[in-house]
Image (tube, coloured by chain):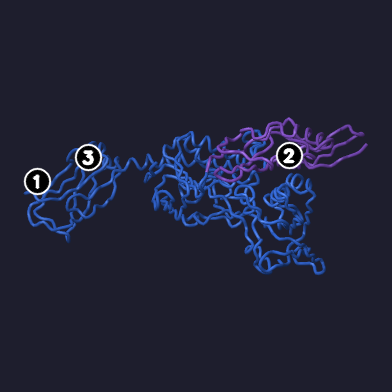
């Protein structure tokens, strides 16, 4: 049996998780104070996932950058690809908060959406 | 849009606490709510906090800062709150008078029945942590870098060292890495992390950025631009440990060394500050020692989560509305006494409508010009004369008295203002 230690990032409480593994299988999760922690610990032990927040260029926007984020988590290992994809595009103002900027980014099934309204300059 | 002279509730600052306070003040029955913001947009510092992690309590969702703000902005705008943008509050008095300088309206004076202070906080700067060495370009607070990278689209440098393990510093370490910069090191003088553990995990550990506890900066190298910093280990009393120095090559140093509640205005209004928090002493409704002046959010103490800031704003806004409504009711009981024809002043200046029920009231005044003939001394309501008596003459050197009898109570209660005129009978 193997034990992995994590700090949960599902919320700001920062619980110390102990995940007991048997090979690739999670046997038990200790230290979490909620169900989100259990989900996080299981996922973190097998294939870590993260939300990604960054900006996309919006040349005619009130500001030159539009903040965007992935509506759900994506595999941590694919963050650089996601960032490269977002960096490669430009969008046009006006944009509304939660407008989809890139649907199903790099086939993750997760949309990249706008974090705020952005009027034209 | 025009700006009134008098508001029920004035909120200073349109960040998370100010927006929450304005929303709750309006919902709590305050008719005229004014929010004053120095930026050109609503939302405050949340607009540059593009990372997620906001709103888990308030919305049960994991939102980035701008979207958390957007939801409050949308609600505030739907309620008919007045927003005065691009406007600085220059002074506030304990009598709740505000002096403003506005891009669109110029100089303004506004009175408030209640005020909510929601100015947030400031970052501690280089001068406040006393780092020796030259003063080259390339030293920024983490929040300044955040504004540049996330909103304005400039990179402050290529190779970074971050002093302090506050949340903004760690978040910027990841953000700069995302944008192609190299973050060499995060140094923390204390033996523990000053920000949230989750930010250590997802901002530093995930991206292989080394954190050194019990380390600080001994010196900044570089004359025109930062060229390197010299780090050093410290003991329990933060003394440098000789022989532990290390030169870390970099072109930019970010400071994430704490936040200080922003209370320059509060002090002007006579608000007492707690030396520990740097913010006002408040009661459970977030009222300060000055009646009718409330404070909420990072202006009171520095929060770790915005959700709690919003909750504080709600409470302060609700309480400010209650105070304002009571104050308005009290103010409405009073009738002003206006010096009319040939009257220089009247004491008292105002009159409680109910006071005449308790007995007669003497009005004392002086005239502007002498009149050496028979005169009328007359007290008028808005629509009719209430009392008139005669004198053989009036002179500025000799005070004049008119008595309002309790028998006039019913008539006085009907009017919104009392005017006294003194004029020759020949002109009547």
Q: Nearer the viewer, residue B34 or B183?
A: B183
Q: Colour of chain B?
A: blue
Q: Do the residues at discs 2 and 3 belong to one chain?
A: no
Q: Residue at x 35, y 43 (%)?
A: B331
Instruction: Report how far apart the C-alphas of labels 3 and 1 lie in the structure.
Output: 18 Å
Classify mark 3: residues with Cα within 10 Å, few (<14), some (14-19) or many (20+). few
| Of A51 and A95, the residue lying toward us | A95
The hue of chain A in the figure is: purple
Q: Is residue B287 visible?
A: no
List the residue tagged with mark 1.
Answer: B428
- B272 or B64: nearer the eye? B64
Q: Earlier in the sequence, mark 3 or mark 1?
A: 3
- Rendered residue at 69%/52% (across/down): B169
The part of the image, by quadrant, that contains residue B252 is: bottom right
- Badge 1 sits on which subunit? B
* Quadrant of the image occupied by residue B213: bottom right
Residue with the mark numbered 3: B382
The numbered mark 3 sits on a residue in which chain? Answer: B
Task: Residue B103 in the image: state x and y as whole percent.
Answer: 44, 51
Report the front residue among B266 and B231.
B231
In this rendering, does residue A39 appear at all?
A: yes
Residue A82: mark:
2
Other residues around mark 1 within 10 Å, as few (<14) / some (14–19) / many (≥20): few
Answer whether labels 3 and 1 touch (C-beta < 8 Å). no
């Amino acid at each position: 049996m193997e034990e992995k230690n994590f700090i949960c990032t599902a919320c700001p409480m920062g619980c110390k998780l102990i995940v007991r593994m048997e090979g690739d299988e999670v046997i038990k999760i200790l230290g979490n104070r909620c169900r989100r922690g259990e989900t996080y610990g299981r996922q973190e032990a097998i294939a870590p996932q993260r939300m990604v927040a960054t900006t996309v260029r919006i040349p005619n926007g009130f500001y030159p950058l539009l903040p965007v984020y992935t509506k759900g988590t994506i595999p941590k290992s694919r963050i650089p690809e996601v960032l490269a994809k977002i960096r490669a595009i430009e969008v046009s103002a006006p944009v509304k908060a939660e407008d989809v900027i890139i649907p199903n980014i790099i086939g993750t099934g997760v949309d990249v959406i706008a974090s705020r309204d952005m009027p034209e300059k | 849009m025009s700006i009134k002279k008098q508001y029920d509730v004035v909120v200073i600052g349109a960040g998370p606490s100010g927006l929450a306070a304005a929303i709750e003040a309006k919902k709590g029955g305050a008719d005229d709510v004014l929010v004053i913001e120095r930026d050109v947009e609503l939302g405050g510092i949340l607009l540059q906090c593009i990372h997620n992690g906001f709103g888990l309590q308030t919305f049960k969702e994991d939102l980035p800062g701008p979207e958390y703000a957007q939801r409050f902005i949308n609600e505030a705008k739907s309620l008919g709150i007045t927003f005065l943008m691009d406007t600085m509050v220059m002074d506030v008095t304990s009598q709740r008078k505000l002096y403003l300088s506005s891009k669109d309206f110029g100089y303004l004076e506004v009175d408030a029945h209640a005020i909510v202070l929601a100015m947030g906080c400031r970052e501690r700067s280089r001068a406040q942590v006393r780092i020796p060495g030259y003063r080259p370009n390339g030293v920024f607070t983490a929040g300044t870098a955040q504004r540049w990278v996330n909103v304005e689209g400039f990179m402050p440098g290529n190779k970074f060292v971050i002093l302090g393990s506050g949340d903004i510093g760690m978040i910027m370490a990841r953000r700069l890495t995302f944008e192609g910069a190299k973050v060499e090191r995060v140094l923390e003088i204390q033996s523990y992390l000053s920000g949230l553990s989750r930010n250590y995990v997802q901002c530093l550990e995930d991206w292989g950025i080394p954190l050194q506890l019990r380390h600080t900066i001994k010196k900044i190298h570089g004359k025109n631009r930062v060229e390197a910093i010299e780090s050093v280990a410290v003991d329990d009393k933060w003394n440098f440990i000789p022989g532990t120095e290390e030169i870390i090559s970099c072109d930019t140093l970010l400071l994430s060394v704490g936040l200080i509640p922003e209370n320059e205005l509060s002090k002007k209004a006579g608000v007492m500050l707690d030396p520990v928090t740097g913010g006002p002493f408040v009661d459970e409704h977030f009222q300060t020692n000055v009646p009718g002046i409330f404070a909420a959010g990072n202006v009171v103490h520095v929060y770790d989560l915005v959700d709690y800031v919003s909750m504080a704003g709600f409470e302060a806004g609700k309480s400010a509305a209650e105070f304002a409504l009571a104050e308005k009711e009290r103010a409405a009981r009073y009738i002003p006494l206006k010096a009319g024809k040939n009257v220089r002043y009247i004491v008292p200046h105002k009159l409680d409508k109910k006071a005449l029920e308790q007995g007669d009231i003497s009005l004392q005044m002086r005239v502007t010009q002498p009149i050496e003939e028979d005169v009328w001394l007359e007290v008028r309501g808005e629509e009719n004369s209430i009392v008139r008596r005669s004198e053989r003459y009036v002179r500025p050197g000799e005070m004049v008295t008119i008595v309002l009898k309790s028998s006039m109570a019913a008539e006085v209660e009907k009017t919104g203002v009392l005017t006294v005129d003194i004029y020759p009978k020949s002109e009547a």
